[in-house]
Image: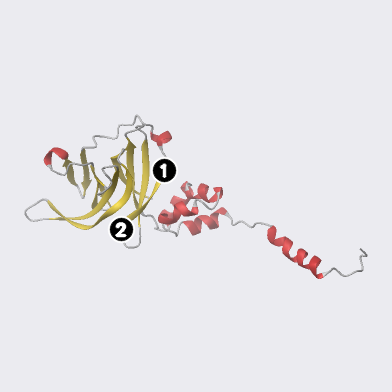
């Protein structure tokens, strides 16, 4: 082809399209600034975008930025144990805009905590809310199931499990209730259930072990 010859429309089109094949990436500080303003509810989805996103979501810099911008959120970390293999599995429970807690995402932390860690007596659950000790013991109630309590930003959350109706006791439902507490003239403290709902369905081999509230 002569250098003086004009390129054909097809060749011109190729020259115009070829630069778009180059991938562009944003600096980490811009991505962290963006992610810090997004609810943690969506982090599991963002972590699927790329390894870079997964790394940033797990970075301490993201938490520091969220703290600086006052964008931290209260989350519940719920531990379940399989009776088949005794392994501990952790799930994250985040709040959605309607104030309920939902959207469990599993994180396998066995390598971090080990299966030998003493998680306490699952049948005697307690928490301290506003300097008041609240406890549940299965001997004091006809509520014969695994129950766990936790302080959740000045309120109490209660998690318990029941069998799924019609499943032949093959599957369980994990329930969660949020209880607002206030001082009472006669009793030390009174509670009002603000909401409760099923947050997870699992096989009957799983049991509730522990629940931890954290600000992240």
Residue behind mark 1: 107
What residue is at 41 percent from the left and 58 percent from the top? 39
| Relative image position of residue 2 (x, y in whole percent) | 93, 65
Residue 109 visible in the displayed image: yes
CA gap between label 2 and label 1 equals: 21 Å
| Relative image position of residue 147 (x, y in whole percent) | 22, 43
Secondary structure beneath dot 2 equals: loop
| Relative image position of residue 80 (x, y in whole percent) | 32, 40
Vertical position of residue 142 compared to residue 35: above or below:
above
| Relative image position of residue 167 (x, y in whole percent) | 28, 46
Of 175 and 47, nearer the camera is: 175
Q: In the image as oriented, which residue stretches furthest toward the top?
A: 116
Q: Dot 2 surroundings within 10 Å: few (below 14), some, or many (20 or more)?
A: some
What residue is at 35 percent from the left and 62 percent from the top? 97
What residue is at 42 percent from the left and 40 percent from the top? 108
Dot 2 or dot 1: first in sequence order is: 2
Vertical position of residue 110 compared to residue 177: above or below:
above
Secondary structure beneath dot 1 equals: strand
């Amino acid at each position: 082809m002569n250098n003086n010859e004009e390129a054909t429309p097809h060749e011109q089109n190729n020259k115009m399209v070829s630069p778009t094949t180059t991938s562009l990436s944003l600096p980490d500080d811009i991505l962290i600034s963006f992610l810090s303003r997004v609810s943690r509810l969506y982090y599991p989805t963002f972590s699927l975008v790329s390894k870079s996103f997964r790394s940033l979501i797990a970075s301490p810099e993201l938490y520091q930025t969220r703290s600086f911008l006052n964008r931290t959120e209260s989350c519940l970390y719920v531990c379940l144990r399989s009776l088949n293999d005794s392994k501990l599995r952790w799930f994250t429970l985040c709040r959605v805009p309607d104030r309920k807690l939902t959207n469990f995402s599993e994180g396998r932390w066995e390598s971090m905590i080990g299966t030998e860690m003493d998680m306490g007596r699952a049948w005697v659950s307690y928490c301290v809310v506003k300097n008041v000790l609240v406890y549940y013991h299965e001997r004091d109630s006809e509520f014969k199931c695994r129950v766990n309590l936790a302080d959740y930003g000045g309120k109490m959350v209660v998690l318990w499990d029941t069998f799924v109706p019609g499943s032949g006791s093959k599957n369980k439902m994990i329930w969660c209730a949020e209880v607002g507490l206030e001082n009472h003239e006669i009793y030390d403290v009174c509670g009002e259930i603000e909401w409760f709902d099923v947050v997870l369905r699992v096989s009957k081999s799983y049991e509730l072990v522990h629940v931890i509230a954290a600000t992240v």
